[in-house]
Image (cartoon, helix red, strand yellow):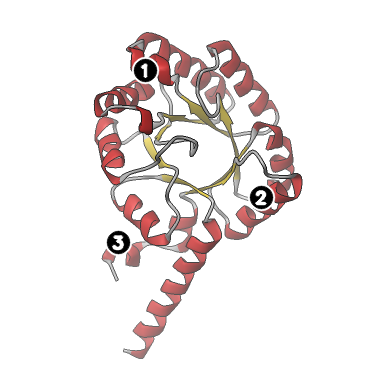
Amino acid sequence: MSSFFEQLSYGDIAKTIDHSLLKPELDDASVEAGCMLAVKYDVASVCARPRDVERARDLLAGSTVAVGTVIGFPHGTSRTETKVFESRLALQNGARELDMVIDIGGLISGDDRYVREQIAQVVEVAHKEGALVKVILENAYLTDEQKVRGCQLVEAAGADFVKTSTGYAPSGATIDDLKLMRRSVSPRIGIKAAHGIRTLDALLEVLEIGVTRVGATQTAAMLDEFKARKAAAAAAAARS
């Protein structure tokens, strides 16, 4: 067992997970069940669709699980005014974490000023309400240079996290991308891995390289396995 695993408590792991409830086909019962799962496992947040923010707020009331939602999702092509309006409405409805998709076409086109100012406007709205902003780059469509530039624009705009993916592009988080992102921003900026973190081993691997949040749908399986491994380790230690 690695020393990294040995150092981690259940809370260390659980509070890195944003339990994702973003699939378009989820019905109300599935959203409710997902929120109850998030409370049971005491994760960092639920990342809900905009239509579900008020429901999630009510279901998570009294817990330590934050309400999150998405802005400009999944393509990032909304105008700045639309993203700002979405953000204000989400905050009004109870969201305290906003996962905003960057203007992917603007980033690829080199329109850095527009991209930065758009992020900054969302950040201004969110930070006034004490909310976090995570900016999704959608790395599947970007070159390494564009990923680095995107990270730098996110930090310059004052956001709190840079995130790999929406889950709706051809590929998601990779170790190489996560290492590149961690090198491209200061320690102030969190790194969120999304799309593809489905096992405990994958979760541990990305946390060890500096990822601070993970978007996940396999939350229960990963955390159950973590508890089982810890229990096995404790039993082995007691026998020795």
Circle 2 crowding by C-alpha within 10 Å: few under 14, some 14–19, many from 20: many
Which quarter of the rendering shows the C terminus?
A: bottom left
Residue 185, labelled with which disc? none
Residue situated furthest bottom in the rendering: 239
Circle 1 crowding by C-alpha within 10 Å: few under 14, some 14–19, many from 20: many
Sequence-wise first label, 2 or 3: 3
Q: Secondary structure at mark 1?
A: helix
Circle 3 residue: 4
What amino acid type is highlighted by mark number 2? Cys
As rendered, which of 141 and 145 lies closer to the eye? 141
What amino acid type is highlighted by mark number 1? Leu
Residue 154, position as x, y percentages in the image: 38, 24
* Residue at the image point whose x is 45% and y is 35% from the top: 169
What amino acid type is highlighted by mark number 3? Phe
164 left or right, relative to 3: right
Sequence-wise first label, 1 or 3: 3
Q: Secondary structure at mark 3?
A: helix
Which quarter of the rendering shows the N terminus?
A: bottom left
**Gap in angstroms between the C-alphas marked 1 and 3:** 36 Å
Q: Are marks 1 and 3 in contact (CB under 8 Å)?
A: no
Circle 1 residue: 107
Check the image and report above or below for 111 versus 211.
above
Residue 168, position as x, y percentages in the image: 49, 36
Residue 35, labelled with which disc? 2
Check the image and report above or below for 88 versus 174.
above
* Residue at the image point whose x is 53% and y is 48% from the top: 44
